[in-house]
Image: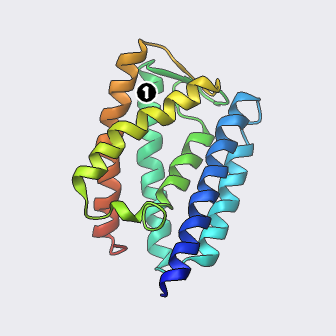
Amino acid sequence: MNFYFMNYFNIINLIGFQIGWWSCVLGAKNGLWFLGPIVMAIFLIIHYFFHPKDPVIEFKLIIIFSLVGTLADSILAFTNVLQYHGGYLTYFAPLWITAMWAGFTATINYSMGWLKDKLFLQIISGLVFGPLAYITGQKFDAIVFNISFFTTCIIIAVIYGLSLPLVYFLNRKMGLD
């Protein structure tokens, strides 16, 4: 694949994910919980249209990691660390969170591909940017921190500090690396 196409696709991938992410947050805030999942589904369809690698295996990775992420977020809800707006059940992460995890997983070989084989940077990125994403969600009233701000950020940092390397590990094991 030529270098310019990969850069172009990475930009489309990054912009598409960001549009989907913001649709999830703003949709949840405004009672339009379905908006984010619909926009993220459109992003994933576009992603597959341009996808230069094995789409079946990547689809499996997206499903697996969407479930892993939804489980992690459901544990945060069940333990009352977070409360999600736009949810269907109090103790489970809402569909828009699952959509975020799906979209996020679709970035790891493209706009976030630079993190491959860089375990230390994967951990640091998870520790820093995981909490920042949730802080943004809180500031836009998509989620509520039910315990102290600091404790919530530490818990989320640990989850993302582990989950980011895990998704790259699964990616490699599934032959997408």
Which residue lies at the image location 58% right of the left edge and 65% below the top edge?
11
Rendered location of residue 43, percent (x, y)? 65, 61
Rendered location of residue 146, percent (x, y)? 48, 14
Q: Is residue 44 left or right of residue 122?
A: right
Which residue lies at the image location 59% right of the left edge and 55% below the top edge?
17
Q: Is residue 6 above or below residue 123?
A: below
Rendered location of residue 126, percent (x, y)? 35, 43
* Figure colour scheme: rainbow
Which residue lies at the image location 60% right of the left edge and 77% below the top edge?
50
Q: Amino acid at mark 1?
A: Leu
Q: Residue farthest to the front?
A: 4
Q: Is residue 65 left or right of residue 119?
A: right
Which residue lies at the image location 33% right of the left edge and 38% below the top edge?
127
User: In the rendered image, which residue does mark 1 sit on?
Assistant: 76
Q: Is residue 29 left or right of residue 83?
A: right
Depth check: 36 or 130 in front? 130
Would residue 13 be seen by someone viewing this image from the given angle? Answer: yes
Residue 168 occupies which quadrant of the picture? bottom left
Q: Is residue 69 above or below residue 103?
A: above
Please state, as top left, top right, bottom left or bottom right, where the C terminus lies in the image. Answer: bottom left
Would residue 84 be seen by someone viewing this image from the given angle? Answer: no
Q: Is residue 100 above or below residue 2?
A: above
Depth check: 98 or 107 in front? 107
Number of numbered tags placed on the structure image: 1
How many neighbours does mark 1 have within 10 angstroms: few (below 14), some (14-19), or many (20 or more)?
Answer: many
> Secondary structure under badge 1?
helix
Rendered location of residue 75, percent (x, y)? 41, 30
Q: Residue farthest to the left?
A: 120
Depth check: 40 or 154 in front? 154
